[in-house]
Amino acid sequence: MKNQLVVLVILFLLQTNETNAQGTTFISNIGLPSTGSMAVGSNSWLGLRFFTGTNSGGYLFQSIQLSVSGATGNPHDFAVAVRDYENRLPGASLQPLTGPDPFGGGVFTYTSSGFNLSPSTAYFIVVSSSTSTAVGAFNVNVAANSDYVAPDGWQLGPYSVVSGNGSLWQPGGSLFQLALDATSVPEPAPLTLFGFAGLLFGANFWYRRIFSSE
């Protein structure tokens, strides 16, 4: 009987904490006109600041899509990462994302194993590769506007940075085209907490009543 009560509690928690695993595209400028592209290489790192929305529970980051015009030469090891925002520069890497080398033109997806983003907070998307642009470059498309703001507080740009080695950064570059997918993290609703407390109270009551009579 005790094990059955434990199972019921676990099932209740799983039900009340279920989230949408597919995520939501919270902000995207991919559909806007493009004014050209920027080269990405080991000597041409690009960083774009973005702000998260206002959901009080924060967000579970899932993936981004990048609009790329293709590659020139023979580049390798295209890399995308989300970094902290420290003194207007990219800070520690929160997580490298997984995805392909974008040799052809199109929109390419780079996924995360999942990590949390705080609400109303600035971060950087950083792109790079292991190949000097003299050998080859991947070219990310640039949006015509300098920033893009979604209704719920998400924002791309207008601040961007460039680096020749991934360590020394300076303002520069443009707003490259991307879409960001995440899942809102819900706060526990008062009724959910009340229901959970009632379930525990009832389970404890019946457990004591059954086993005290044996």
Image (spheres, grey):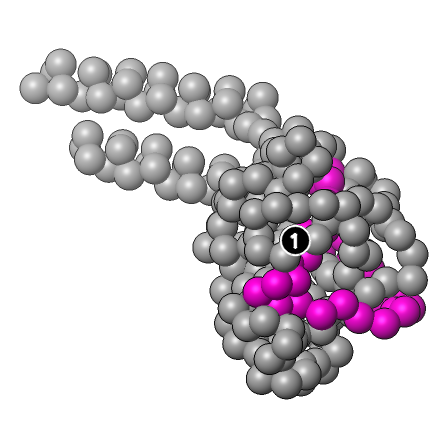
The span shown in magenta is 25-53
Residue found 64% across the figure and 73% down from its top: 133
Disc 1: CA contacts within 10 A as few (<14), some (14-19) or many (>=20): some
Where does the image place residue 107, in percent across and percent down from the top left?
70, 74
Where does the image place residue 202, in percent across and percent down from the top left?
35, 20
Q: Which quarter of the rendering shows the C terminus?
A: top left
| Viewer-closest of 210 and 97 | 97
Left or right of 186 on screen, residue 72 = right
Above or below — where is 194 with respect to 141?
above
Residue topped by disc 1:
163
| Viewer-closest of 144 and 64 | 144
Where does the image place residue 122, in percent across and percent down from the top left?
69, 37
| Viewer-closest of 14 and 144 | 144
Instruction: Verify whether residue 157 appears in magenta.
Output: no
Disc 1 marks which amino acid?
Answer: Ser
Above or below — where is 27 with respect to 31?
above
